[in-house]
Image (cartoon, grey):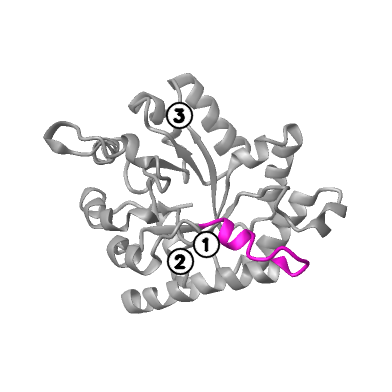
Amino acid sequence: MTRKKLFGQILKKKSYLCVGLDTDINRIPKHLLQYENPVLEFNKQIIEATQDLCVAYKPNVAFYESMGPQGWQILAETLEHIPKEHFTIADAKRGDIGNTSEMYARAFFDKMSFDALTIAPYMGEDSVRPFLGFQGKWVILLALTSNPGSHNFQRTLQENNEPLFEKVMRSSAEWASPEEMMFVVGATHAEDFKKIREIAPDNFLLVPGVGKQGGDLKKLSELGMNDHVGLLVNSSRGILYAGDAEDFAEKAREAALVLQREMEVVLNERFG
């Protein structure tokens, strides 16, 4: 999916919401356990309930890997149920030596046809480049994550008192254009969005941490939005587990609608 097409979907739906499909069989409503494939049924109902309110879905691959071979099949079938106009992100956080990264890229881009893949940049440029150059595909590089441990390394000062995450963003911006590279920036770091936009004015940012982790959607939108919106704000648990009874999909829709309506206000103010 191109940046232009993604921007168009955002304006059409008045939403820059990404729904994270971090589906845990131990947390889904108990009545679904009667189905032959409870996780897939849960995902299908979540997608059906939220597809008009979001522009992207982000399965966290670990939740499917943990189920063994069946989990990979569930992931593939989940992907088939996501409408084609949605941006799909494999949250796999890959990144290894060049030939290994090339195999990961083939798996998620060629075989599974995801639009984007999250990448850990710690091993450097040669571990990231194999993911680039796939037409219509995106690298989403970890920059400043939403978890508490992000302070352990990501803010470590480098030369010129530059935090490590800033160095990562400045360096990697030279490897690819904003047409194929995004950055992960946690919603819990809203105070950094102004600086981040100075470093990466044109890139999309994937923003986890709204909802359960306490991120402020209005503040990060004001500081982080660019002329192509440039934000995909992810919510996982706050939507998936908004309800735990037979009306779980309806409750998920209600939770997604709250975020979408707030996004619509921001978009109307900015883009009319």
Which of these two is toward me, 94 or 14?
A: 94
Disc 2 crowd rating (10 Å Cα; few below 14, some 14-19, many 20+) is many
- Residues under numbered marks 1 and 2 in contact, where contact means CB atoms less than 8 Å apart: yes
Q: Residue at x 18, y 38 (%)?
A: 162
Which numbered disc covers residue 95? Answer: 3
Tell me if 111 is positioned left or right of 134 in this view. right
Which comes sooner in the sequence, label 1 or label 2?
2
Secondary structure under the numbered disc 1 in the rendered image: loop
Residue 209 in magenta stretch: no
Q: Where is residue 168 in the image (x, y as percent from the top left)?
A: 28, 36
Query: Magenta span covers which residues?
Result: 235-248
Three-letter code, disc 3: Gly
Q: In this view, does 151 lie above or below 124?
A: below
Residue 246 in magenta stretch: yes
Q: Which residue is drawn at 62% across and 66% down?
A: 50
Secondary structure under the numbered disc 2 in the rendered image: helix
Three-letter code, disc 2: Ile
Three-letter code, disc 1: Val
Q: Residue at x 30, y 64 (%)?
A: 227
Disc 1 crowd rating (10 Å Cα; few below 14, some 14-19, many 20+) is many
Tell me if 229 is positioned left or right of 174 in this view. right
Q: Where is residue 133 in the image (x, y as percent from the top left)?
A: 42, 36
| Residue at the spot of label 2 | 10
| Residue at the spot of label 1 | 55
